[in-house]
Image: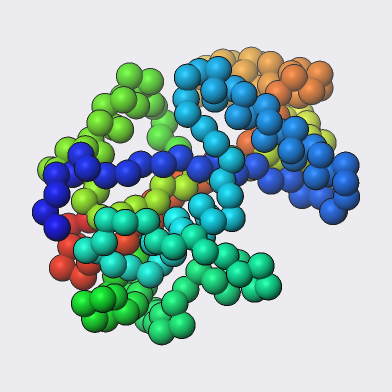
Amino acid sequence: RGYPISLREYRLFLFVSKKTGYSEKAVLEQLEIRKTLLASLQSEQMEARTVTTENFLSTWRGLLNVDSESIDPASGECDPHEPLNRQLLNPNFEMKVQKNRLILTADTPRGAQDSVVQSFSMKKNPTQFALWMTPDLYSNLLNQSKGILSPFVITGAIKMQAQEKSKSQAQRKFLDLDKKANSPYAKLISGTQEAAAEWKKIKEDLAKDAIALCQLYYNITVFSEPEQAMAD
């Protein structure tokens, strides 16, 4: 509708999952994690609340059943007798698969409307990153020339490796680098001794269960109108 880009809604959703069988103990552990997380955020003066089923349905219905003219939240009405994944899409929802993107079509009060879905993933972490860049990057979201004008979802996932696997990996890495650091190899390749010292510290901390090794996944999914897709 031509509203200023600052009139947009940004929300952060935090999900924590653990690979385990269903049991009362597992449920209580997850509830305790959620309680601790909420308390930590609120202690930092960050407003946080538990997402209800209605909140979840409203958020994803608004993204998947596209209506670019609507500024009102989608319905969060829930049918307790139907699985959640069966309640997200309108019955007339249509999806076309094209190279590098999806085309979603849904009915709106003004007729059928298309939305182009594009996904961008980070292949590897940057070799250098300055902490001061973070607020600058987030401020660009409100900049019409640098920000993303269409609705988007940023997904960041941190997956913790099994501790025993991490300990074995760190041991192998340290032994390899330590051998190289005490050989002529270190004189040819700068940073070998520093890398060996770093992996020695990681190995020792893992042995004390003081740290854990994690994998990071970062992805941006953009929901654009067809004429805006290339710009996004």
Residue in view at x 41 percent, y 47 percent: 154
Q: Give percent across and percent down for residue 122.
A: 42, 47
In the displayed structure image, the side of residue 142 where residue 127 appears, left or right? right
**Image quarter (top left, top right, bottom left or bottom right) of the C terminus:** bottom left
Viewer-nearest residue: 6 or 172? 6
Viewer-nearest residue: 17 or 78: 78
**Residue at the image position 54 percent from the left and 56 percent from the top:** 54
Image coords of residue 59 (percent x, y): 45, 56
| Left or right: 49 in relation to 137 | right
Give the quarter of the figure containing the N terminus. bottom left
Q: Is residue 14 visible?
A: yes
Q: Quadrant of residue 66?
A: bottom left
- 117 with respect to 80 (left or right): left
Residue 71 image-quadrant placement: bottom left
- Give residue 184's position: percent from left, percent from top: 59, 19
Residue at 69%, 46% in the rendered image: 17
Report x, y in % for residue 216: 55, 41
Q: Residue at x 59, y 22 (%)?
A: 40
Q: Is residue 151 above or below residue 107?
A: above
Name the foreground residue: 197 vs 52. Answer: 52
In the displayed structure, 209 sits above or below 151; it is above
